[in-house]
Image (tube, coloured by chain):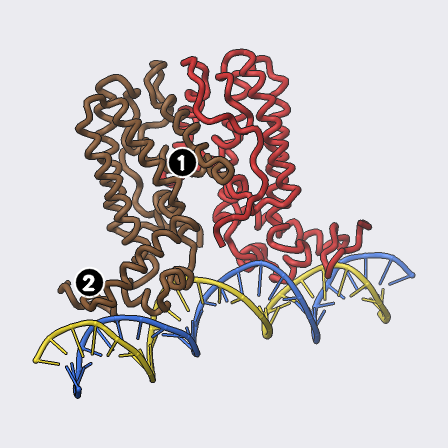
Chain colours: A brown, B red, C yellow, D blue
Amino acid sequence: MAEGRCMTGTTPTTPSRSDAVRNRRLLLDAAAKTFAERGVEVSIGEIARRAGVGKGTVFRHFRSKEELLAAIMLAMFDELVDTGTTLLTADDPGPALREFMVASMEIFVRDRAFCEVIGRPSLQNPQVRDAIDRLCDVAEELTARARRQGTVRPDITGTDIVLLLAGIQPTAAPLLIAEPQAWRRYLELALDGITATTGRTLPHPPPRHLPLAAPDPGH
Amino acid sequence: MAEGRCMTGTTPTTPSRSDAVRNRRLLLDAAAKTFAERGVEVSIGEIARRAGVGKGTVFRHFRSKEELLAAIMLAMFDELVDTGTTLLTADDPGPALREFMVASMEIFVRDRAFCEVIGRPSLQNPQVRDAIDRLCDVAEELTARARRQGTVRPDITGTDIVLLLAGIQPTAAPLLIAEPQAWRRYLELALDGITATTGRTLPHPPPRHLPLAAPDPGH
DNA sequence: TCCTAAGCGGACCGGTTGGTCAGGTTAGCG
DNA sequence: CGCTAACCTGACCAACCGGTCCGCTTAGGA
């Protein structure tokens, strides 16, 4: 509730002392890099080591591993949403949508944890959920413009776009180590797929929203 | 080397006693179900519990968790390869390829571990590698026929097909709990993408083989 | 029916994880 | 400069993992 105080044990929302601020920065940077490289499964210990702080410091700044992950993911989602919002003002909706997808993929491919979070509802806390919804919304707006222009088939939604983007990474993943640009091939395939060429409607109704966190069968 | 003997500690290749045969069956069934539902990360303890045997019994029948997983995955790969081989004799190559992809997806969607094994080279022992190669080969033969017929664009390979199939599962995954048939939508999109409509070539050269196990950055 | 080797189970081992805490350190106000 | 509250650290904890091992059980041939 109140700002500076914590709810359960410790964990202030914003540190005030200079060393704490510095450590928080180090921590966020190290965590972002480590999550990106090795996915959500990396241990807190490794992140702490990489940041050059003790493990306890991590839990002083973030109540749990999940909260640390969420803080980093949120920033990335917002970045993407900004990119999308900017592209909404572009003249030609078709290339704008494509550019949005390319920009997204460039992040997806670099950040393993980012894809995992989108694909696994169990990793999503309410804030992350909101960010994903915002991403779907901006994708929907971009898609709607392209749809009206006739560049995209009429039964493709923004949620389709987000799902496709999240899916291209695992599709290309086995090739990416040897050929870091391979994702472009499958993005192009997806773009061809969503383009209105045949008049056919897709089977199964288009998704409107991403479903809320259902209990993940795993773990 | 010799049949009935083990190499390292214990672990016969084929049990003879009736109770051992029965337990092995129970174990394989339980493991198949559990891996399918929760992925490769499930613990041996849980599989043992589900099979109604002790943990020690698992390691009597299989040298390691990896070997148990491989035994189950191998059977599924071979099943798919058989399906593909049969479809090679079909009259019309286009629908044959489609049918192969539908049959594959029906397995992929039901089995979480199966997708994970394809997508993560670090999980592949030599036998599994061979099975994946056989799958790519049969996919390549099916694709080649469709290519010659003009149903599929000229720069699509069998490895492309396998990667796309493995990628559709994570794409549709968030929807699958609520809508188990949602994968059909994205399979159709992929089929539209690989169909020869525009004369354009895809960016990035087509993959010939899946890369061998590179050190998985994770763990 | 008896005997023995194959089979079984679960306590156990070393290693990992996310998370806690007591005790030493230090920033920075007065 | 001195004091205190904020902060940092690494030992520590319980839970879990894959895998081992040894004493007990039991299948099934003689």
Q: Is residue B121 visible to the viewer in this orientation of the structure?
A: yes
Residue A101: x and y in percent read 32, 31
Q: Specify whether B18 is left or right of B164.
A: right
Label annotation for residue A167: 1
Q: Write down the chain letter for disc 1.
A: A
Residue at image point 36% right, 14% down = A198
Separation of marks 2 and 1 at Cα, in angstroms: 36 Å
Give the vertical position of B20 relative to B124 (above or below).
Answer: below
Query: Dots 2 and 1: beta carbons under 8 Å?
Result: no
Quarter location, residue B202: top left
Residue C5: x and y in percent read 82, 63
Along the line of sight, the residue nearer the viewer: B14 or A126: A126
Quarter location, residue B192: top left
Give the vertical position of B47 relative to A158 (above or below).
Answer: below
- Residue behind mark 2: A14
Marks 2 and 1, the one that precedes in the sequence? 2
Along the line of sight, the residue nearer the viewer: B159 or B172: B159
Q: Write down the chain letter for disc 2.
A: A
Along the line of sight, the residue nearer the viewer: B201 or B59: B201
Label annotation for residue B122: none
Q: Residue furthest top?
A: B149
The three-letter amino acid code for the residue at tag 1 is Gly
Residues packed near mark 2 inside 10 Å, few (<14), some (14 to 19) or many (20 plus) = few
Residue at image point 49% right, 47% down = B39
Give the vertical position of B219 relative to A140 (above or below).
Answer: below
Residue B33: x and y in percent read 54, 46
Q: Is residue B103 visible to the viewer in this orientation of the structure?
A: no
The three-letter amino acid code for the residue at tag 2 is Thr
For the C terminus of chain A, which image quadrant?
Answer: bottom left
Q: Secondary structure at mark 1?
A: helix
